[in-house]
Image (tube, rainbow, N blue to C red):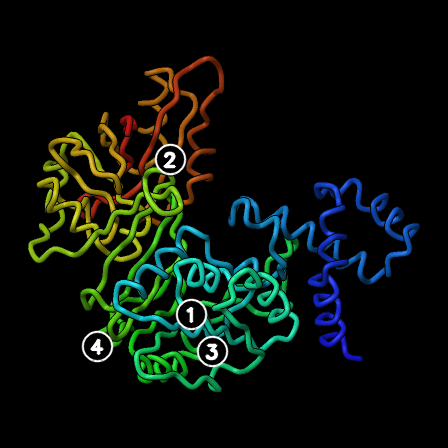
Amino acid sequence: MTSTERAAELMAALASPSGLALLRRLPVYDEATVLSVTARLRDEGVDPDLASAALTQSRLRSRARGRLGPVADRLLLTADGLEQATRPAVAARHAERFLACGVEHVWDLGSGVGMDSLAFAEAGLVVTALERSAEVAVAATANLAPYPHARVVTAEVDSFDPAPGDGAWLDPARRTPGVADARGRTRRVWRLSDLSPSWEQVLAVAARTAATGAKLSPGFRAEDLPDGAEAEWVSLDGGVVECVVWWGRAVRQPGISALVGTSEAAEAGAGGTRWHVVEPVSDAPEPLQSADALGPFVGEPDRAVLAAGLTGTLSALVNGQELDHHVGYVSAPAPTPVPWARWYAVEESLPLHPRPVRAWLRERAIDQVTIKKRGVSTDPERFRSELRLRRGQGQEGTLILTRVAGTPTALVVRPLAP
């Protein structure tokens, strides 16, 4: 038996009633108690390989709780599957997109452990999940077991046979299988040509279905967007998590947009998350032409807005201007509240050199600084060390290292309350 076959066999054993009961008996995962738990399982007669697999599941579930929430405690996971698993609130948005365009059956091509399939099934969609790995397919089958209208097939992506009106979802692998760092995370790939399924396969799927979505890296370039498609960069609680490209009936408006999510109380919406759509504007102001035109406030758009290249939307909304081309900070006369931007009051604009910044900070007894940087090559930690601030009972400050009208600048700013 090969190692791949053995891994699938062990996953199937964990998915069985006795395997699930074994997982329920395990204590909360703690690296310090692994040896004692292993010894206890051995004394109970549990197969050593199965015991190891169960402890691996316990460890993965522990890691998954912060990303996936309480549902993690009932899932079967793999290390690669967890790294690529879609957060439930985000997956629910994918399902809503298919529902809104009239799709009833979605093919999840390369489903992984099935987080998007779970959202599709919970939304009432019929789901056919294709997964090439036998081990991962077993995990996805167990995870989707509560939904009779969802099935998992062990097959290659190109074997699917859609009916007219079907939708397709793809989450191409963006990590190198088996190549992990010290924290167990596999190495990311960034080029479209390195995806699996390939970008060409994704495009072929989009040509065969009524509506298609593909989850890609936030580093996807707008210039690679096919004609007629829509690219949507998505963030959740300040972290940009994906760029989804939509085709066919799933397209609401061709081009680019950003979707900004904030976790709130359950009444805020599906998954307890409030969502805000940011779209491009046709009349975005030009960036500042002179440093003398710097306004009293600086706005910083959400990371999804930055990734989508939509800083100009904030500039237009607040009657402001970007500090310089592609730096992502906006100068404005007033801190207009929007849920997808943070605001800072500008206290001083200084040359981007440690000496004048150090003198300004020391004169005001500021000995702790938060440093933000965009648009300059300055290393923030080296700049901090060159400030040579003497920690004591002084004040805290915030620096933005960036360009203002083409000039490298250190802005001393004060964060404003949301």
Q: Are marks 1 and 2 in contact (CB under 8 Å)?
A: no
Question: How far apart are the two marked residues, 1 and 3, measured between alpha carbons?
Answer: 23 Å
Which residue is label 4 attached to? 227
Which residue is label 2 attached to? 265
Quarter of the image with the N terminus is bottom right
Quarter of the image with the C terminus is top left
The image quadrant that residue 246 belongs to is: bottom left
Question: How far apart are the two marked residues, 1 and 2, measured between alpha carbons?
Answer: 29 Å
Q: Tell me where residue 356 appears, x and y as whole percent.
A: 31, 29
- Residue at 16% of width from left, 39% of height from top? 331
- Residue at 41% of width from left, 63% of height from top? 217
Q: Earlier in the sequence, mark 3 or mark 2?
A: 3
Look at the picture and state if 64 lies above or below 165.
above
Q: Tell me where residue 2 appears, x and y as whole percent.
A: 77, 79
Secondary structure type for disc 4: loop
Secondary structure type for disc 2: loop
Crowd rating for badge 2 (residues with CA inside 10 Å; few <14, some 14–19, many 20+): few
Secondary structure type for disc 1: strand
Q: Earlier in the sequence, mark 4 or mark 3?
A: 3
Q: Are marks 2 and 4 in contact (CB under 8 Å)?
A: no
Secondary structure type for disc 3: loop
Amino acid carrying label 1: it is Val
Crowd rating for badge 1 (residues with CA inside 10 Å; few <14, some 14–19, many 20+): many
Amino acid carrying label 3: it is Pro
Question: How far apart are the two marked residues, 3 and 2, measured between alpha carbons?
Answer: 37 Å
Q: Nearer the viewer, mark 2 or mark 4?
A: 2
Amino acid carrying label 2: it is Ala
**In terms of depth relative to the viewer, which is nearer, 263 or 379?**
263
Q: Residue furthest top?
A: 393
Q: Tell me where residue 375 appears, x and y as whole percent.
A: 30, 49
